[in-house]
Image (cartoon, rainbow, N blue to C red):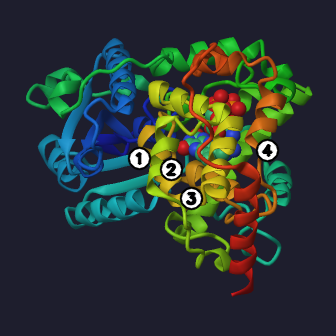
């Protein structure tokens, strides 16, 4: 029996209508459930590219969501502005009794949600939040002494030990409870993307909920070979589902259900990657300072001597190091980069160009379709050897050996830096000498460890 007349489900990075904890709870506790998304002007105002592809990703997901809600006799509410004003405003307009949403573990989101909660509580509106983005939240897997893990392998073992089959069960909302459009007659609908200040751009990925399901289906054939193929950028060896996990067009439970019962090395390796995702969410949640500082204190004082001209060359894919340039050009033109290459270009920026990892992190944050603060920070701190369970500082990727090992036939290179293979090519010489820079990097890290 519903306990409220009207509920509001506030979507953020969970842009789907199935397997959704907050929506399920709203539909079980309220007679009528309205679903809202707010184009958050606080976040959008910080984006300097009006063709930022992520807006196309979000917009496409919302279009599909709206269509799905229409089939259930309702529609999506889409607002623009600061959620701290927009949510209380729509609550008032619709006479909402309770608001439901899934937790977000980023600093900005936590602060925003606390502020909205305080405002609503003052108005006598109930407020419910749920774990949905992860299987285990930051405080659910702790060491025996009650403190958070700082090393992945024991965390992963504890994760698997704690995990029970039912944890990935579908959270199915009763969509018959969605609010009738007649009650939404004067409430904002989804408008074309340019209304929100952005242009539609080309995205090569299948988008929306349908795109997520399509990619999952395609990956079904590759999963068993994931452990073998995952490091080769020219192969379709990985799922490309990160964008969907980021925006919630696929739930983490669906991803876990997909690999859990398949007993092979590929499925096992893929589950471990999903656990890396949770590990980094946990790190960001429990050690929020990592957003700004190296996890390892001894490396916070490093003064990076790298040049800004080198940084620009790295960003633009013209360092004269083919595998680095190929990867950066792929990022700039598609918004995606293979995991192996993310590690290679990150290592190159920090340990060859001697540039602060936070500059690379910020550039990825601008460009990656799947940008996620926790995974991005974790990946950068791992590569820069400043992170909690990072590679040791003396492990410096040699870009040329990486290319020979992981793109041995130059298939990936040919696609992104074809001029390397041309006669009389004007492809530049490397902007640095790897051997020399490696020694400089080792000195920098050793020096920092002594201070
Ligand atoms: C420097 C650097 C920056 C990164 N920035 C991001 C980022 O902003 N957003 C992001 O989602 N991933 C990031 N990663 C992790 C990883 O590169 C991507 O998740 C992966 O390449 C996405 O491709 P996929 O979906 O085909 O992955 P798959 O190999 O199919 O993996 C399945 C899923 O597991 C998760 N995952 C895989 N590897 C990792 C990892 N190392 N850490 C955390 N989660 C992982 C992702 O959600 C991914 O979709 C970064 C890695 C590095 C080294």
Q: Is residue 296 above or below residue 196?
A: below
The residue identified by callout 1 is: 101
Does residue 132 appear in this view?
yes
The x and y percentages for residue 56 are 34, 25
The label number, if any, that marks residue 357 in the structure image: 3
Residue drawn where x is 58% and y is 79% of the image: 301
Location of mark 2 (residue): 310
Q: Earlier in the sequence, mark 1 or mark 3?
A: 1
Q: In the structure shown, which secondary structural element does the residue marked by tag 2 occupy?
A: helix
Mark 1, residues whose alpha carbon is within 10 Å: few (<14), some, or many (≥20)? Answer: many
Q: Quadrant of residue 48?
A: top left
- Cα separation, mark 1 vs mark 3, equals 34 Å
What residue is at 33 percent from the left and 48 percent from the top?
99
Q: Under tag 3, what secondary structure? A: helix
Along the viewing direction, whichever of 26 and 36 lies nearer the viewer: 36
Of badges 2 and 1, the one in the foreground is: 2
Residue with the most extreme front position? 424
Q: Residues within 10 Å of mark 4 (few under 14, many from 20)?
A: few
Q: Earlier in the sequence, mark 2 or mark 1?
A: 1
Gap between marks 3 and 2 measured at Cα = 14 Å
> Could you tell which of marks 1 and 4 lies nearer the N-terminus?
1
Which residue is at the front of the view, 152 or 103?
Answer: 152
Kindly check if marks 4 and 2 are in contact, taking CB atoms under 8 A apart as contact: no
Label 4: which residue? Answer: 164
Numbered disc in front, either 4 or 2 = 2
Residue 423, by quadrant, is top right
Q: Secondary structure at mark 4?
A: loop
C-alpha span from label 1 to label 4: 24 Å
């Amino acid at each position: 029996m519903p306990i409220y007349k009207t509920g509001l489900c506030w979507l953020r990075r969970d842009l789907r209508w199935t397997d959704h904890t907050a929506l399920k709870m709203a539909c079980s506790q309220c007679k009528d459930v309205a679903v809202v998304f707010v184009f958050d002007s606080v976040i959008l105002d910080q984006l300097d590219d009006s063709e930022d592809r992520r807006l196309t990703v979000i917009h496409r997901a919302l279009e599909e969501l709206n269509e799905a809600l229409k089939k259930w006799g309702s529609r999506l509410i889409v607002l623009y502005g600061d959620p701290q004003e927009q949510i209380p405003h729509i609550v008032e307009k619709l006479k909402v009794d309770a608001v439901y949403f899934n937790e977000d573990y980023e600093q900005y989101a936590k602060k925003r949600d606390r502020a909205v909660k305080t405002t609503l509580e003052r108005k006598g509106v109930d407020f419910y939040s749920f774990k949905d983005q992860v299987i285990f939240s930051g405080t659910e897997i702790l060491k025996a002494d009650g403190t958070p893990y700082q090393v992945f392998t024991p965390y992963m073992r504890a994760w698997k030990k704690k995990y029970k089959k039912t944890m990935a069960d579908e959270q199915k909302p009763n969509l018959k409870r969605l609010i009738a459009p007649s009650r939404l007659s004067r409430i904002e609908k989804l408008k074309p993307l340019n209304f929100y200040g952005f242009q539609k751009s080309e995205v090569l990925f299948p988008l929306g909920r349908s795109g997520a399901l399509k990619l999952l289906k395609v990956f079904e054939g590759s999963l068993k070979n994931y452990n073998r193929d995952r490091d080769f950028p020219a192969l379709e060896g990985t799922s490309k589902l990160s964008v969907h996990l980021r925006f919630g067009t696929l739930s983490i439970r669906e991803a876990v259900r997909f690999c859990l019962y398949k007993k092979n090395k590929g499925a096992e390796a893929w589950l471990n990657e999903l656990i890396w995702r949770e590990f980094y969410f946990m790190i960001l949640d429990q050690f929020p300072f990592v957003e700004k500082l190296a996890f390892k204190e001894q490396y916070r004082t490093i003064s990076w001597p790298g040049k800004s001209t080198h940084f620009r060359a790295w960003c633009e894919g013209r360092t004269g190091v083919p595998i680095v340039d190929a990867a950066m050009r792929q990022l700039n033109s598609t918004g995606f980069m293979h995991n192996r290459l993310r590690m290679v270009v990150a290592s190159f920026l920090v340990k060859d160009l001697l540039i602060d990892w936070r500059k690379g992190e910020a550039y990825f944050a601008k460009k990656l379709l799947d940008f996620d603060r926790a995974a991005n920070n974790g990946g950068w701190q791992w590569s820069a050897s400043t992170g909690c369970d990072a590679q040791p500082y003396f492990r410096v990727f040699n870009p040329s050996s990486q290319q020979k090992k992981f793109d041995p036939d130059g298939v990936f290179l040919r696609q992104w830096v074809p001029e390397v293979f041309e006669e009389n090519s004007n492809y530049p010489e490397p902007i640095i000498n790897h051997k020399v820079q490696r020694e400089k990097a080792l000195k920098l890290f050793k020096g920092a460890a002594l201070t």
